[in-house]
Image (tube, rainbow, N blue to C red):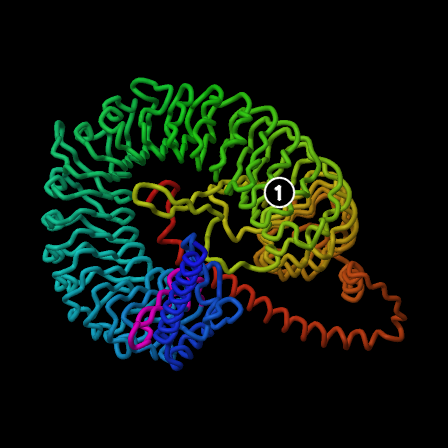
Amino acid sequence: MGMGSSWFDFFLVHQFILLLLINFSCWFSFVQTQTLCHDDERSALLQFKASFTIDMSASQDPFAYPKVESWGSLERNPQSSNCCSWDGVECNNDSGHVISLDLASSYLHGSIDSNSSLFQLVHLQRLDLSDNNFSYSQVPSRLGHDLTSLTYLNLSMSSFSGHIPSEVSFLSKLSMLDLHMPYSLANLTQLLVLDLSQNQISGEIPCLLANLTQLTKLRLGYNQITGEIPSCLVQLTQLTLLDLRFNNIQGAIPRSVFQLKSLEYIFLNSNNLSGYLEFDEISKLQNLRGLRLSLNKLSVQIKTGFRAIPPKLNLLELSSCNLTEFPEFLKYTSELMHLDLSDNNLRGQIPKWLWNSTSETLLFLNLSHNHLTGYEENPVIIPWHRLSSLVLDSNMLRGSLPIPASSMAVYSVSNNEYAGEIPEKFCNTGTLTILDLSNNKLKGMIPKCFQNLGALQILKLRNNSFHGDIPQICLNTSMELAAIDLSYNQLQGKLPRSIASCPQLMFLNLGNNQIIDTFPSWLGTLQQLKVLILQSNAFHGTIGKPASSHEFPELSIVDLSSNDFSGSLPSDYIENWNAMKSVDENEQIYIQSAIIFGMYPDIFHYDYPITVFSKGVELKYMKTPYLLRLIDLSSNKFEGEIPVIIGNLRALLLLNLSNNTLTGPIPSSLWNLTALESLDLSQNQLSGKIPTSLAQLTFLSYFNVSHNGLYGAIPQSPQFDTFQEDMYQGNPGLCGKPLSKKCGDSESATPQTTLEEDEDSGFQIELDWFVVLPGVITGLIVGVVGGNFWTAKKHDWFVDTFNRRRRLAKRTQKRREQRPWSY
């Protein structure tokens, strides 16, 4: 037994050693045969990486990340010497040459010119640089000369401009092209997919596209294409997808489109198409699955009793199509999942047959902006069992709120006449992402169970009659809540401290309630917070010092007006508000939340309205401008001097410090606020002269210093000449235009004015005028001439930069801009 056991042990050891040898041999073989990239291609990739900066605003995909960041870094990637192992790089297993480069959604910002090292990668077969920002540079002609092996090319959503070079027609191996409007594609007869969407393409659709007879998908959406849809597209008999949405295409839809029997999806929404369209033309497309005609100038005609709906239709968008009745053919749908009939003239009640025919299939329903009053049979629970998104905004819906289905992610019924309380059963919907009940007649308390809505991203209960305490929102710190708008209610108590646990919170509006609390300094840890509106409540006490220099880093709109704050103005917080110190280069036009939902997932932007008092009037913004920088601390009990440091907030547009008890001079540092449009310092106890340097604020359209203790000459400039007399009333010592009181010589003496303006910077100078007067005059002449030259240069640069950014952002956003819930 002992001998047998020894032989058995020997056998096991022998087998173990043999396995080790085999594994080592395999590992050694793997090491020997592992693909290594060529030195020249590694160098070309690193040069290509170095030609760009990483900019988080350059990509729109929520899953974007900087793929090139780990290239060539031994710390992050032990195999960094082998470029074939780099993120987004693929090599041929045999030759080691780079054959695929996928840097889609990589935050790349820069330009690609003819000298780019990219064109040294001559073996590339696939190139994807989509969803980056190439600064409106032109597509280089070397693409067609040097990268002739390409079979796949994607440069979409990357801010290229100009015409596509004719050399691209040399890429005869392409089977998928995604970049700009092609004018020289006649040779690409094997092309199956042509995707030119989301660029700056202009001009008309060329008939040369009809030569691409193998084409199955044509995407030209989100551009600036004009003209009509050419009838020559009838030659594309293999076409299954025609996507022309979000352009400026005009005229009628040609009948030839409905002769393309293979068509499955037609997306023509958000153009300028006009004329009448008989739905029976569309019904001839028996393979049709999706149809989008929304947001045009079309009138879709549907004959009474018509029921020949395409059997596979599951997406139908007829928003803004002049419909007056629910299309009866919807009774006969069996697969409809997505229905948008918004912005029409539908009246009366939602017919029961609509939910009978779609109760088991419908996922998305938008009936907003009509004249609907309710349901034919008012349901307690939303009658579509699988519905994910319900949008009924801006109708005349009455009665109690129907309880959302358990599967619902979007429940939006703002601007209706719903009354009563929010049922507790709302909290049974754990998937709610957007809840908008704004502008109704709802009352009662906000259910405490709202703290359990862990998926919530947007909560809007604005302009109702809710009272009581605000629930402990964001108890679950993993919540992605981006916006809370509870303004214009009757909410009481203190702010729940749990709000500080909403790491993604960007927009917080609690204005016009009855909240009693001190300044919520604990919100300063929210790194994404851009808008903080606490106006017209009962906040009180002093605003102390921030806990660190990193408090409120993104704050750009602060409205604390009409409260009971006291003490000095919060200069330490003002110093932290870095977002107000420079013009953001982000291309957004509005502060929005990007929400992805729907049967065919699209990114759309959800807007936030705000109401502020500025320029002497109440301003209502239906969408909060992204570039708006606003501070409103008016109608409180602030005292002391205006901090000089406020002059560092160079991007500030609106500043309102009126109706406090502020003292001291107007700081001359305010001339640094070169973007300022409105300045209200009225109803205080300010003294001294109005700094003459404020005359250089060329954007200033509202200036109110009434009811203070100011004296001396009012600055004269084309801008100041536009301000009326009542902007200065209550200051008996002021003189000059537009007042009837003339200024004497002593009141316009330049040396005295200059010295007084310097006092707010901490300098006190005592001079013997008889001794130094000649030197002062000489210095003033040199200083004023040189200073004005420098100021003019700096101001021109700032204004030019600011305007260029605005124009660039407008061009980028113009084609995307639409009201919420539209695709």
Crowd tier of the residue under label 1, counting other residues whose Cα lies within 10 Å: few below 14, some 14–19, many 20 or above: many
Task: Identify the residue position indicated by label 1 in the image.
Answer: 559
Magenta-colored stretch includes residue 426:
no
Residue 74, horizontal then vertical, whole percent: 51, 71
Q: Which residues are magenta?
A: 86-109
Residue 375, horizontal then vertical, whole percent: 32, 21
Q: Is residue 693 above or below residue 544?
A: below
Q: Residue at x 17, y 56 (%)?
A: 216
Q: Indicate the quadrant containing the C terminus: top left, top right, bottom left or bottom right.
A: top left
Residue 280, horizontal then vertical, whole percent: 12, 38
Q: Is residue 735 above or below residue 81?
A: above
User: Left of 272 or right of it: where is 586?
Assistant: right
User: Left of 405 or right of it: where is 440?
Assistant: right
Q: Amino acid at mark 1?
A: Asp
Residue 649 visible to an observer of this rendering: yes
The number of numbered discs placed on residues in the rendered structure image is 1
Q: Residue at x 29, y 47 (%)?
A: 270
Residue 809 visible to an observer of this rendering: no
User: Left of 311 or right of it: where is 534?
Assistant: right
Q: Residue at x 30, y 51 (%)?
A: 246
Figure quadrant of residue 790? bottom right
Q: Indicate the quadrant containing the N terminus: top left, top right, bottom left or bottom right.
A: bottom left
Between 675 and 819, the one nearer to me in the picture: 819
